[in-house]
Structures are given as structure tokens and as C-alpha cells.
Amino acid sequence: MSRIIALAAGLVLAAFSANAQEQVTDFHLDNGMQVVVIEDHRAPVVQHMVWYRAGSADEPAGASGVAHFLEHLLFKGTDTLESGEFSATVAANGGRDNAFTSYDYTAYFQRVSADRLELMMRMESDRMVNLRLGEAEILTERDVIIEERNQRTENSPGALMREQLNAAQYLNHRYGVPIIGWRHEMETLSLEDALAFYRTYYAPNNAVLVVAGDVDPQEVLALANTYYGVLPANPDLKPRDRSVEPPQTSPRRMVFEDPRVAQPYVTRSYLAPERNPGDQKTAAALTMLAELLAGSTTSLMNERLQFEKNIAVYTGAFYSGSSLDQTTFNLTIVPAQGVSLEDAEAAMDVVLAEFMETGVNTEHLERIKMQMRASQIYARDSVESLANRYGRALSSGLTVADVQAWPDVLQEINEADVMAAAQLVFDDRQSVTGWLTGVTSEVSQ
């Protein structure tokens, strides 16, 4: 009976997804700004987002953290708004706003009633070109981001270890520099640093406007032309030119010791391909690989290491291909009480070797596909999720067509594709293995 139910559920999901493609309209303004409109008329709300194709990996050497610093500074004053007035206005109109920075992009968003969209465009377009900063704002906000680093990184042994792991993984690429910045460089960020980044990257021809919700595409286009279309493009904007990672020919290992660690664990990072325009098959196979290894309680690492052998209390496999350049595939094992880090790592390697020998469980792969399809359908209920999915992809080098094709690319992945991706990514020469421990005795002599 359970197989019949599963089959019926699969047929329903397949039928639903075939008729439930997002209603997306894609425009380009004369100044080069991309405008993407995603219609969802089920509730009178709208998510308004501006994504800049500039993140921490675009920062100049010696000024790490300036992308995130500037994100904070954009909530200061402009020619028409006092410091803090932007967010206060959003709140007064019943909405909420925020921003975030990653390696490849910086995004600003407001979620408001659909009839407040014009107000959001007026304010957001204003701070794209009219930011006004002084030394007082720089000093105050620099203290804020340093305190943020204290809370999120310095107070977390795991965060400090991951920071060191990333630095070891990327020998030459800016992905090895933390998004929030190295503390010693954050402490010297200046008004000139912030304004230089702003003037270079905060221009309509380096931005994507994503509007999702109860809107009409032509009305959004008219508003976008009114508020964003009149802004000048940056004629000196150059193509994104990143330093290239050299061939990695030796595995790296590190041990991070911190007396605050209550639960030691092992983590490993491998260089891995990212999603590329028109070529997402390998990324889709790696997405499936992560799910097969440790995506649920029935995945291979969980079954073998937690339930059968009681070696681990947690295992994880993580991959996200939404990056402009080469990303990583990560594995984690948290050993059970009495199990050393050395034995936990060895047990994880045994399971990986077993997987490479026996291959993919077909039934498990099909179950994961059905779960992913369901998750993608349910995600359409959130205009915030829709806007983020398109904005993240478009600011990382992908296209609208790539975003819309992704669910089907995932469904087309077979056992051979997964094994080919595993063979590609599990190259010890491109790996970094880290031990997080609170006691020196955990480390093998």
C-alpha cells in the first residue's frame, strides 16, 4: 500500500509542477539594470529586492569586510532621508526591511503591502546614488561590525575553525577571506574605502531588481523606468575578474583547539564545481550526492554511523552550487561519546569508500527526487523565497532560464551522474580536513 501511495503522490507532484511554473517576466532598462517580476496574486503583498553583483570576493586586497560595511552604511542618510529614516518609513508603512552580504552579491529588501511598492522604489533608487556619509557614521558603524564579528565569530570556536578551514581551502581565491572580514583589516576601514566600493559597484548596470508578489509586470516596468531608469550607468564598470585558484596537489589538515569546545567534530571540505549557465548537470548531481550521503535519517552516513555502529551523534553533507566561482562540498561527523576524532574520521572514510564501491541506491534516489519536487512546489507559497531564489542565481552568473530549468535538471539525474560527480569531487588533493577539539589529548601524536 505504501508504494501505491508514494506512486500516486509522485504523479500528483509531477502533474502539479508541470502546470505551476512561476510567472516570470524579465526586462532590461536602457541603463543596463535587469528587472525580474514574479507574479503571485494570492495575497496583496510584494517583496522588493535590489541585488548588486558585488560581494566580499570583489573587495580589494587589504580592505576585507568593506562590502558588508557598506551594506550597514546604506541605512544611513541620503540627500532626502535622514539616518535611520529608510527603515523607519518601511516600518511605518507596515513592512519590514533588511539586507545581507555574501561572497558574490549584496542584497537589500523590503516586504510590504503591494500598494507601497512605488514608495520602496523611490527610497531604494535614492540610496543607490545619493548616499551621504561622514566620519562620524564611519566610526560608529565600524564599531558595530566589529562587535558583530565578536558575537558571530570570535565567540564561536566552530566559526573560527570554519574561517581557518576556508582560508586553507582557497589558496588564491577571495572565497578564502571571511565575508565579514579579517578583524585587523576591519579596524582600518575608512570613509574612502566605503565610498570607493560604492561608486564602483552601486550602479544600475550592476544591479538586479527583483519584484515578487501581487503585481502587474508592465506596471512594475513603468515604476522601474521612473525611479531606476533615470539613474546613470557606471561606464567604467569592468567585468568581474577574480583571481584563479591554482591546481591543488596536496591534501591539507588542521586542528583547531579551543577550551570552549563542548562537542568536538571532524569536518572536511573539497573543491567542487558551481552551477554554470546552461550547464547545471554536475551541480545537480552533487546536490543529489549530498542528500544521498547525509540528507536525512535514512541517508547512508546516518544509517551506517549513527544507527548501525553508534559511532556518531550527527553526520552531514553540504553542497550549494549558487556561486560565481568554484565552491565546496563539505562533510561533517560529530562522534558519539567515547569515540575519538581519529576513529570518527576513519569510520566516515570507510562509508565513503563503501559508497564508491557499491554505488547509488536507486530507490533512495527516487525518493529524494520526489521530496525535492515537493519542497520546490511548497517554496512557491513564499514571495520572499521566490525573490531570493531568482536574485541569488542572477547575481551569481545564472539566468532566468537556468533557475526555471533547475527542478527538471535535478529530476533527470541518474545513478551514473551521481557517481561521476562523486568521482570528480572526492579528490583528496583538493581537500582540507579539520578537527575541532577542546582538549589537546584528542590530537594524535
Image (cartoon, rainbow, N blue to C red):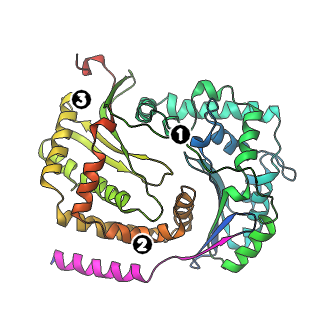
Residue that badge 1 annotates: 243
Image-quadrant location for residue 350? top left
Q: Secondary structure at mark 1?
A: loop
For residue 377, which numbered disc appears in the image?
A: 2
* Part of the protein shown in magenta: 2-28
Left/right placement of residue 287 relative to residue 72 reads left
- Which percent across, then down, holds residue 62? 63, 29
Badge 2 marks a residue whose secondary structure is helix
Q: CA distance from mark 3 to mark 1?
A: 35 Å
Amino acid type for the residue under numbered disc 2: Ile
Mark 3, mark 1: which one is toward the viewer? 1
Q: Which residue was labeled with disc 3?
A: 341
Query: Going 24% across and 29% down the picture, which residue do you hit?
Result: 341
Residue for point 21% across, 56% down = 298
Residue at the image point whose x is 28% and y is 78% from the top: 9
Q: Quadrant of residue 141?
A: top right
Tell me how far mark 2 sits from mark 3, CA to CA. 40 Å
Q: Amino acid at mark 3?
A: Leu
Find out whether the residues at labels 1 and 2 contact each other: C-beta distance under 8 Å: no
Pointer 1 local density, CA inside 10 Å: few below 14, some 14–19, many at least 20:
few
Q: Main secondary structure of the magenta part?
A: helix
Q: Percent x, y for residue 362?
A: 18, 65
Give the number of marks: 3
**Residue 87 appears at what percent x and percent y?**
73, 53
